[in-house]
């Protein structure tokens, strides 16, 4: 069969795509929904890390991932992709960023281009779930703690203690060696004095 | 004197006549009313009498509500008080989804970022974002942005930052913000202007 593989015709995203899109509260109709999401996608591309309500973040993430994926896949000479970029990015300086900064950055990634975290909420307070949506490879400090170099983890605590013990032993050895040498020196000095006398 | 004596005699005679008349009319009956305490009635003060009972005195201008007609069953009362564990649970149950942060020791929900660590990070992030936007303005963004703190620009030769937009923060790098992040973002600028071809299967 001389037929293109369907799975390769569209960009394969590395995130979960919801089978049913969220409607949101949009008195202006379905267009209003897309306008809302355009705002969010533009903000994400601009600031690389944004904090917002979870459903909107999850929804906007899919569009942002698709946009970046298409930018990598087709480049900036593809008419449809450029139209899409023009539609989704309301601030036009970001169209340059999409093709010149983000596409090269994510070219060799084999994971999603964005990350979605659940943000803490004040208690007692608003019960709606908040989210932090960010692009990978951003210049900001990581929101997740550094788990590799955590001194409080049990194996690190044990290793630290073992290190301490080993050092103490070594110091004792060195101290005893110095004492021995000092004694030796004393005895040799005394012997030389006696012979000279 | 004579007149009063006369009046008295007449009075006594009339009383005798009355007694004899009563005895004649009711020979075996009870004593007549004259012997009852009829005179007490005359001494009562008018206005001290109890008023007749009226429901209006109690409610006044208000109105009377309906009252429950049937007893509410125990099951129903309990369900209303404590709810249902499957549907609406009204009992206050302990949360088992709280953990202690390994970095700062604060409590946080499972799967949700630690509030204290996150606050620290997001404050720094906002400062950096403001600084980056101040630097970039509305010009087209064509290169990666590197954020450097005080005294970090001179540490490395200018070739190291080639192809990068340097944004300088006018303060010292926070101790918790690893410097290695700047190294991760470095990459050589593209030498070719080729556009990646579309890969159809």
Image (cartoon, coloured by chain):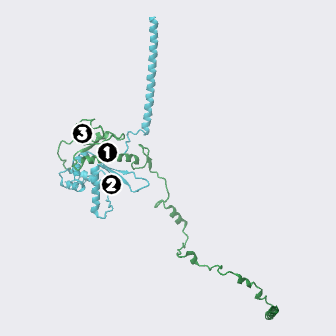
Chain colours: A cyan, B green
Q: Nearer the viewer, mark 3 or mark 2?
A: 3
Q: Which mark is residue A140?
A: 1
User: Marks 1/3: CA distance?
Assistant: 17 Å
- Residue A48 screen position, x and y as percent: 29, 49
Dot 2 alpha-carbon crowd within 10 angstroms: few under 14, some 14 to 19, many 20 or more: many
Can you say whether A73 is above or below A19 in the image? Answer: above
Residue sitting nearer the eye, A65 or B189: B189
- Residue B5 screen position, x and y as percent: 82, 91
User: What residue is drawn where x is 46% and y is 24%?
Assistant: A172
Q: Secondary structure at mark 3?
A: helix
Q: Nearer the viewer, mark 1 or mark 2?
A: 1
Dot 3 alpha-carbon crowd within 10 angstroms: few under 14, some 14 to 19, many 20 or more: some
User: Marks 1/2: CA distance?
Assistant: 19 Å
Q: Which mark is residue A57?
A: 2
Residue sitting nearer the eye, B197 or B130: B130
Seen as rendered, the residue at the extreme front is: B1
Q: Which mark is residue B161?
A: 3
Dot 1 alpha-carbon crowd within 10 angstroms: few under 14, some 14 to 19, many 20 or more: many
User: What residue is drawn where x is 46% and y is 12%?
Assistant: A187
Can you say whether A103 is above or below A170 in the image? Answer: below
Residue A58: quadrant of the picture: bottom left
Q: Secondary structure at mark 2?
A: helix
Q: Which mark is residue A73?
A: none
Question: Chain ID for label 2?
Answer: A
């Amino acid at each position: 069969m001389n037929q293109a593989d369907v799975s390769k015709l569209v960009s394969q995203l590395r995130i979960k795509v919801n089978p049913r899109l969220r409607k949101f509260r949009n008195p202006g109709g379905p267009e209003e929904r897309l306008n809302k999401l355009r705002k969010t996608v533009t903000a994400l591309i601009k600031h690389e890390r944004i904090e917002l309500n979870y459903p909107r973040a999850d929804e906007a993430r899919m569009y942002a991932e698709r946009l970046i994926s298409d930018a990598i896949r087709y480049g900036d000479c593809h008419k449809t992709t450029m139209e899409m970029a023009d539609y989704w990015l309301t601030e036009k300086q970001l169209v340059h960023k999409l093709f010149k900064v983000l596409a090269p950055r994510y070219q060799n990634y084999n994971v999603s281009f964005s990350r979605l975290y659940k943000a803490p909420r004040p208690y007692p307070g608003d019960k709606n779930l908040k989210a932090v949506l960010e692009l990978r490879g951003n210049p900001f400090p990581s929101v997740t703690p550094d788990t590799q170099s955590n001194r409080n983890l049990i194996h690190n605590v044990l290793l630290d203690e073992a290190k301490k013990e080993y050092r103490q032993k070594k110091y004792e050895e060195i101290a005893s060696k110095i004492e021995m040498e000092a004694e030796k020196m004393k005895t040799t000095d005394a012997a030389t004095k006696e012979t000279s006398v | 004197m004579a007149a009063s004596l006369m009046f008295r005699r007449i009075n006594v005679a009339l009383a005798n006549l009355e007694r004899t008349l009563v005895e004649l009319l009711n020979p075996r009956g009870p004593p007549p009313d004259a012997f009852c305490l009829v005179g007490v009635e005359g001494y009562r003060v008018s206005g001290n009498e109890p008023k007749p009972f009226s429901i209006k005195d109690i409610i006044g201008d208000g109105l009377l509500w309906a009252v429950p007609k049937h007893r509410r069953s125990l099951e129903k009362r309990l369900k209303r008080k404590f709810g249902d564990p499957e549907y609406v649970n009204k009992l206050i149950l302990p949360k088992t989804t709280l953990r202690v942060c390994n970095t700062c020791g604060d409590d946080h929900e499972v799967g949700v970022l630690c509030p204290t660590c996150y606050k620290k990070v997001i404050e720094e992030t906002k400062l950096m974002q403001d600084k980056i936007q101040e630097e970039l303005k509305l010009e087209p963004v064509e290169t990666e942005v590197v954020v450097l703190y005080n005294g970090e620009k001179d540490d490395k030769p200018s070739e190291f930052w080639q192809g990068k937009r340097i944004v300088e923060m006018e303060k010292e790098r926070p101790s918790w913000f690893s410097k290695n992040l700047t190294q991760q973002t470095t990459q050589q600028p593209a030498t070719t202007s080729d556009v990646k071809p579309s890969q159809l299967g």
